[in-house]
Image (cartoon, rainbow, N blue to C red):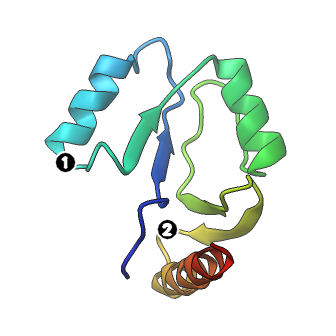
Amino acid sequence: LQVGDGFRFISIFVYPQSDKQERLDAYGARYGADQARWKFLTGPVGEIEVLARDRFMLGFGGEPVQHSLRFVLVDGQGGIRGFYDGTDPESVATLKDDLSAMLADSASQH
């Protein structure tokens, strides 16, 4: 899968009391994440809960916060294109296909 300059990975960490930006940056560096393409973010728990539950439709349990193994494909306008199980090879293959189609649509519009 070849990706253009507009493609980004976003990982949202759900423990802002311990997931400080310096720690997230170090985590990404440890695993060789391209910091120009992969952003590790956190924020206030209440805002993360609203984003996870209301926007990404991911379950948000009580403490401790539940991590999701799902990927959410979001286009450049903030529209959700799909939800995918990161542990299911078929679902990940569908994600790749949907991402390729989204990138092709985006390229043809420019």
Question: As drawn, is 88 to the left or to the right of 56?
Answer: left
Near-viewer residue (41 or 5): 5
Indicate the amino acid at tag 1. Answer: Tyr
Q: The C terminus is located in which quarter?
A: bottom right
**Up/down of 73 relative to 53, above or below:** below
Residue 105 position by quadrant: bottom right
Judged by depth in the image, the label closer to the viewer, 1 or 2, is: 1
Q: Quadrant of residue 103?
A: bottom right
Which residue type carries mark 2?
Gly
The mark found on residue 86 in the picture is: 2
Identify the mark nearer the N-term, 1 or 2.
Answer: 1
- Packing grade of label 2 (10 A; few <14, some 14-19, many >=20) is some
**Residue depicted at 41% across the width and 61% down the height:** 5
Residue bearing the label numbered 1: 31
Query: Eyeballing the image, is 108 above or below 110?
Result: below
Residue, x 39% and y 16% (percent of image)?
A: 20
Q: Secondary structure at mark 1?
A: loop
Q: x, y percentage for residue 33?
A: 25, 49
Distance CA(mark 1)–CA(mark 2): 18 Å
Classify 10 Å Cα crowding around label 1: few (below 14), some (14-19), many (20 and above).
few
